[in-house]
């Protein structure tokens, strides 16, 4: 498929360091794969291998129908790359950066001008189009960098920590732009340190540590592996804390966690919303007043810490989703 990406057994070493250690990836056309992992896990090296900036020591990779080793030029013409740092020329205006990128891709002058105007409008940069990009804010530079990556309308887009250093407003604008591209059929590989970003944008996730994929699955899969939902409540009156804990223990079937300083009670909620309703009814029946109650699922941050907080898995096993995703999962 023109916009798909497939990699098997990718390996890359630097001296004695095995930065990428047998990674398999599979993204169907129009899919978004979020590649997560701590600093030094190998995420950026994977991106550099798939974008032909590095040559793998072992393994194979096909991007947009082209082998990254045998046909790197065709790969480069089929991809867009927005790296960790905006790769724009500060001395050129936004419009000039885009036109120059178009010329490098072989677009004729008129086509490059037209494409530049389209992208300036799309990314909200028309008013600043003729200002030197060195005067742009961080968010504007990042949007310009993404626009440059899209000049040739590539079927596959690589985003390596695209929102690093952006304020919340700029980050949301960037996310909106990526979602628009995906709706149009662009395939995306995203690396990020922002778990909220991965939760929103990625259809499927792979967690990398020490060059290996140690977990993969949908966001729901990974959160379920981390322990499912929890009931959390805040008691209005501290003297009712023990009564609330007793009621929760009776319904949940195990002692809850009690934080006396915060007047909170929390416990695993395998019964989901039905169990939450039972807890609310029991508290009301016994006259225990609460100021807040809810059913909370683990966040991706908690999943990430659970997977990587104790170091790499010594056996390299995949703890969630041993195989690649099925078409239904995407």
Image: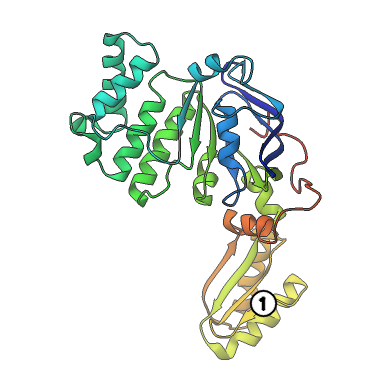
Q: Point out the residue furthest to the right here.
A: 315
Q: Quadrant of residue 232?
A: bottom right
Percent x, y of residue 325: 70, 34
Residue lying at the far front of the rendered structure: 15
**299 versus 172 height, above or below:** below
| Quadrant including the N terminus | top right
Residue 118, visible in the rendered structure: no
Residue 8 percent coordinates (x, y) = 72, 29
SS under mark 1: strand
Residue in view at x 77 percent, y 74 percent = 254
Left or right: residue 67 compared with residue 51: right
Residue that carries the numbered disc 1 in the rendered image: 257
Which of 38/303 is in front? 38
Front residue (pair 276, 56)? 56
Quick check: 35 above or below 127?
Answer: below
**Left/right of residue 152 with respect to residue 304 in the rendered view:** left
Q: Residue at x 70, y 44 (%)?
A: 16
Apparent side of residue 215 relative to residue 121 in the rendered image (left or right): right
Percent position of residue 45, x then y: 58, 38
Total numbered circles: 1
Q: Locate residue 330, reporting x and y percent.
A: 63, 32
């Amino acid at each position: 498929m023109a916009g798909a990406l497939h990699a098997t057994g990718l390996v890359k070493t630097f001296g004695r360091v095995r930065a990428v250690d047998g990674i398999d990836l599979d993204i169907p056309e129009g899919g978004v794969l979020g590649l997560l992992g701590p600093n030094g896990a190998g995420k950026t090296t994977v991106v550099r291998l798939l974008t032909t900036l590095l040559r793998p020591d072992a393994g194979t990779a096909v991007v947009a129908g082209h082998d990254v080793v045998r046909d790197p030029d065709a790969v480069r013409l089929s991809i867009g790359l927005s790296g960790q740092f905006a790769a724009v020329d500060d001395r050129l205006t936004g419009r000039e950066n885009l036109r120059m990128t178009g010329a490098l891709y072989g677009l004729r002058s008129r086509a490059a001008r037209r494409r530049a105007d389209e992208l300036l409008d799309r990314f909200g940069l028309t008013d600043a189009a003729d200002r030197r990009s060195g005067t742009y804010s961080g968010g504007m530079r990042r949007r310009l960098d993404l626009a440059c990556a899209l000049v040739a309308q590539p079927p596959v887009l690589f985003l390596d920590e695209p929102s690093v250093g952006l304020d919340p407003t700029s980050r949301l604008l960037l996310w909106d732009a990526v979602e628009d591209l995906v709706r149009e059929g662009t395939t995306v590989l995203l690396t990020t340190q922002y778990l909220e970003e991965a939760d929103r944008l990625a259809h499927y996730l792979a967690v990398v540590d020490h060059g290996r994929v140690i977990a993969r699955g949908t966001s729901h899969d990974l959160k379920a592996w981390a322990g499912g939902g929890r009931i959390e409540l805040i008691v209005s009156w501290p003297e009712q804390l023990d009564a609330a804990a007793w009621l929760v223990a009776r319904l949940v079937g195990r002692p809850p966690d009690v934080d006396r300083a915060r007047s909170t009670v929390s416990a695993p909620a395998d019964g989901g919303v039905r169990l939450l309703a039972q807890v609310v009814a029991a508290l009301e029946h016994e006259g225990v007043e609460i100021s807040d109650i809810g059913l909370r699922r683990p966040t991706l941050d908690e999943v990430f810490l659970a997977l990587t907080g104790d170091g790499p898995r010594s056996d390299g096993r995949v703890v969630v989703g041993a195989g690649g995703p099925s078409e239904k999962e995407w």
